[in-house]
Image: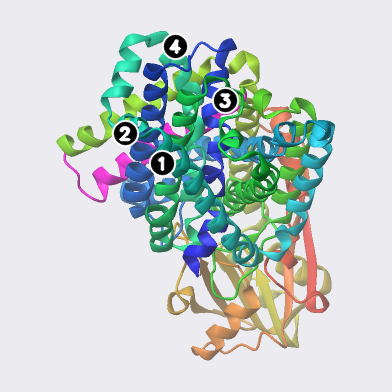
């Protein structure tokens, strides 16, 4: 069932590439790639060996091994690599920078993929029913909007619904391909790698330009890795080698056979493989499949966003778990609606898959390079690969991916700037948040004062002990929670039972229940204060009451159902203090204002939560 669900979420993007990949290659620059046997064999061979090397070899076989406690994606890989390198060194800082840049490029891909996938399917109307061509853009916008609306129901339900559809889709891909191959079995020659080599040697410049479109056949590989936490490594591998890879191979071979038989079919080789009577039903099925294709990057964007947030590169996000069995299946409303707005704007601006293809590929190939770099760093430090093995894997992948990236650089002036702009914006946001968080923590620490000093000064003050339990959420056990300081300073009271709870986001996706909670007692003149530490992985839901209840069962003397929770809220004000440029301070304050409500984020009861705080100048 997980493999079926993976078909409905993980493989939608790469599974719908046959709709536009080959067509785009032969449409480049007015048709510089010709429908001749040499060019057709060369292109199909490039497509097949690209899928084999990048998807089957690199991602499914190699990179899925680098799972961070079951989680995937470039941020999870960066966090995994950082754990295995020497702290404080250049490589320690480099891995997270690479992760941030890779995640930013992934967001660029996440905006373009739904638009190009849906439009490439809807444009089949122009083939099967030319009179309906004017409806393509409105239909595409409606479908995209509906897709983002249903995200709140979760990838579990979405996957179960989409999975059977994708089984039919891949079966149809295979059947269409086999029918064409049977008519011209000579196309099977293109499975031999020398045809790709001959194509490059005979037409080096044309082949280089064509590589910018061939890469469309492997888009979705990074989403495959990012979505690993939703379904697991084994189901993804089974689905890929058991159905997806064979179906894609047969369909691309079939498109090549059709082009050899009928060169005019380069205008729409996918749809023209089908009989006339089947073309309209195929448009409907392709539309369903491309809706599913969009799901891959949307789900991946949720996972990458939560990983970035837990690692300190994004503000706190409202995250909803949508499955009782799979912890990785989540819904992030802010990310969902931001992506929705971006995709719709893109679709309405470009209005066709051909125009969108000019902007597509740069973000994907950039992420390929960063992922390869990170996995090789991890392989050296964790798997103890020697230099020979690193070069044997890294050099072929590096040459191939650098070629893809370079070929897509030619698209910058024709729309390729868009994913770069998105990536630069996200990098700026992430690094600004990370830097601002450090500065605010430093200034907040000086305002709060040391906890030990505060506690032992209570004896000389007129402070009354009142019955009840107070839980103060605070980022550390060194300084005094502002809410505690304000409660004592203004109300002159302290609760009979005081718990100072800090939450720690560990550099792993999940923390087991037995390791989640630790505590120690801090004596004071007015009773005992308990210092509690709750540890969460960057994929765990930070539910404080639930975790405290589990700690109670483990021996902690607390009743979270009867306690009052106190939050220290900081009001940020822009000042002239050094540390960040003025525009970055404005950006940080804006991000902070839009961060998730801490009481919701930590699942605190609204009727027993008190917010107190102070002002900090940034």
Asked if labels 2 and 4 touch by Cβ distance under 8 angstroms, the answer is no
Residue on which disc 1 sits:
249
Give left or right: position of 263 versus 462: left
Circle 4 residue: 206
> Residue tagged by mark 3?
265
Asked if residue 599 is positioned above or below residue 123 in the image, the reply reads below
Q: Is residue 187 above or below residue 221?
A: above
- Asked whether residue 89 is in view, the answer is no
Which label sits on residue 71?
A: none
- N-terminal of the pair, mark 4 or mark 2, is 2
Does label 4 or label 3 sit earlier along the sequence? 4
Res 191 label:
2
Q: Are marks 2 and 1 in contact (CB under 8 Å)?
A: yes
Q: Badge 4: few (under 14), some or many (20 or more) residues near its Cα, within 10 Å?
A: some
Give SS at disc 1.
Answer: helix
**Per the image, is 346 magenta?**
no
Q: Residue at x 56, y 44 (%)?
A: 13
Using the numbered discs, state the Cα–Cα distance from disc 3 to disc 2 in whole angstroms.
Answer: 21 Å
């Amino acid at each position: 069932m997980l493999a079926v669900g993976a078909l409905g979420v993980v493989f939608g993007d790469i599974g719908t590439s046959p709709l536009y990949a080959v067509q785009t290659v032969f449409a480049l620059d007015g048709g510089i790639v010709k429908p001749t046997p040499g060019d057709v064999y060369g292109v199909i061979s490039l497509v097949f060996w690209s899928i084999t090397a990048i998807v089957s070899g690199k991602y499914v076989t190699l990179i899925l091994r680098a799972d961070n406690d079951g989680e995937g994606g470039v941020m999870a890989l960066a966090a995994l690599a950082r754990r295995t390198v020497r702290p404080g060194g250049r490589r320690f800082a480099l891995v997270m920078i690479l992760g941030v840049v890779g995640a930013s490029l992934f967001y660029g891909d996440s905006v373009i993929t739904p638009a190009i996938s849906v439009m490439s399917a809807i444009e089949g109307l122009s083939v099967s029913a030319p009179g309906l061509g004017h409806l393509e853009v409105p239909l595409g916008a409606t479908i995209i909007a509906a897709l983002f609306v249903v995200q709140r129901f979760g990838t579990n339900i979405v996957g179960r619904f989409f999975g059977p559809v994708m089984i039919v889709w891949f079966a149809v891909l295979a059947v269409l391909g086999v029918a064409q191959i049977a008519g011209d079995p000579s196309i099977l020659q293109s499975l031999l790698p020398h045809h790709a080599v001959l194509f490059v040697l005979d037409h080096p410049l044309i082949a280089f330009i064509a590589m910018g479109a061939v890469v469309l056949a492997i888009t979705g590989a990074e989403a495959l890795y990012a979505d690993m936490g939703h379904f697991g490594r084994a189901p993804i591998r089974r689905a890929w080698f058991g159905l997806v890879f064979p179906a894609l191979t047969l369909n691309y071979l079939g498109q090549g056979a059709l082009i050899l038989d009928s060169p005019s079919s380069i205008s729409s080789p996918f749809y023209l493989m089908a009989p006339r009577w089947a073309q309209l039903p195929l448009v409907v099925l392709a539309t369903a499949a491309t809706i599913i294709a969009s799901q891959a990057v949307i789900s991946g964007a949720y996972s990458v966003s939560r990983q970035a947030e837990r690692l300190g590169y994004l503000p706190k996000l409202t995250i909803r778990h949508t499955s009782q069995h799979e912890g990785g299946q989540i819904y992030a409303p802010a990310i969902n609606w931001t992506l929705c707005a971006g995709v719709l704007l893109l679709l309405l601006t470009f209005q066709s898959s051909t125009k969108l293809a000019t902007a597509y590929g740069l973000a994907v190939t950039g992420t390929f390079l960063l992922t390869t770099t990170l996995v090789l760093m991890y392989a050296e430090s964790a798997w103890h690969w020697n230099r020979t093995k690193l070069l044997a894997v890294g050099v072929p992948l590096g040459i191939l991916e650098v070629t893809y990236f370079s070929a897509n650089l030619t698209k910058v002036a024709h729309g390729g700037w868009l994913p770069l702009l998105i990536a630069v914006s996200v990098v700026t946001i992430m690094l600004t948040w990370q830097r601002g968080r450090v500065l605010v923590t430093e200034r907040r620490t000086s305002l709060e004062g040391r906890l030990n000093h505060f506690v032992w000064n209570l004896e000389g003050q007129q402070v009354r002990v009142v019955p009840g339990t107070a839980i103060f959420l605070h980022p550390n056990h060194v300084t005094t929670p502002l809410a505690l300081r304000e409660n004592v300073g203004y109300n002159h009271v302290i609760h009979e039972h005081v718990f100072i709870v800090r939450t720690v986001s560990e550099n792993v996706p999940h923390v087991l229940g037995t390791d989640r909670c630790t505590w120690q007692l801090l004596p004071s003149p007015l009773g005992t204060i308990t210092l509690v530490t709750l540890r969460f992985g960057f994929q765990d839901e930070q539910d404080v009451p639930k975790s405290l209840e589990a700690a109670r069962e483990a021996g902690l003397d607390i009743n979270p159902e009867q306690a009052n929770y106190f939050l220290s809220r900081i009001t940020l004000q822009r000042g002239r203090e050094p540390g960040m440029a003025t525009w970055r301070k404005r950006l940080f304050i804006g991000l902070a204002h839009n961060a998730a409500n801490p009481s919701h984020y930590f699942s605190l009861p609204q009727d027993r939560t008190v917010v107190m705080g102070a002002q900090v100048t940034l």
